[in-house]
Image (cartoon, grey):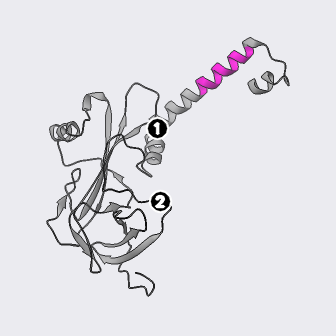
Amino acid sequence: MTGLALAGMVAVEVGSLVGVGAGAMGAGTVLTHALGRERRFGWSLMAKGVRNPSRWRVPLPIADPKAGTLRRAAGPALASGPLLQAPFTGRACVAYEVAVLFDHPSDAWPPTWVLREMRSCAFEVDGREVGADRATLGAPVAAVERPVMNEDQKRRFLRERGLFLADGSFDLYEAIVAPDAYCEVLWPLAPEGAPPFVVAATGPVGRHPYRG
């Protein structure tokens, strides 16, 4: 209505325009607040992908999303170095990704990702080696409702990464590649030296005649 009135197509008093604008802004704020606060909707929507975290530690260079796949390997992930321990659940793993979702308790903004961190030990899949901290996980992260760390350990973990519990609410997410888990490793075409993606497979994966 405001746009039409300004174009001279609808006759509306200035006071009405202000009312419409204020109403739209108010409705937008209420909607944003509702989406940010409804955990079953807002949090599950955010957890579909960790995007634009303010702090991150991932292997570089980042793969070009438009690039194809140079080669693939499929099979169990066999550790060739000491296994890692996932920070939030304590599970032994070949690789993990942890992420932290932050929400301030008294604002109307939706939650935001403040941390994304990936680690991996040296491992091989189908005879192809992946160096330590040279894998990008392609698995979605899942919420960790009961982390193995106590509040002091959680506070220390966050503080070491420039995050402070007093600032608001932090929700923890995690994904792992378990030892000997079947997975597929994909090396991207570009840029040169980009780390491979590791994606889960539902079961044993046989050789494919067209796989590199």
* Magenta extent: 16-27
Q: Residue at x 41, y 62 (%)?
A: 191
Q: Main secondary structure of the magenta part?
A: helix
Q: Is residue 186 above or below residue 113?
A: below
User: Residue 177, position in %: x, y?
Assistant: 28, 65
Mark 2 highlights which residue? 65
Which residue appears farthest toward the bottom when viewing the image? 209
Q: Is residue 157 left or right of residue 15?
A: left
Residue drawn at (45%, 52%), measured in percent from left and top?
A: 48
Q: Is residue 180 visible?
A: no
Placement of 61 over or under 159, stated as above or below: below
Residue type, mark 1 in image? Glu
Residue 81: image x %, image y %? 15, 68
Q: Nearer the viewer, residue 42 or 119?
A: 119
Residue 205 or residue 33, whichever sits in front: 205
- Residue depicted at 40% across the width and 75% down the height: 71
Question: Quick check: 208 left or right of 90?
Answer: right
**Residue 24, how many percent across, how many down?**
64, 25
| Residue 38 - label | 1
Sort mark 1 into few (<14), some (14-19) or many (20+) by Cα contacts within 10 Å: few
Nearest the eye: 155 or 2: 2
Does the magenta segment cover residue 19? yes
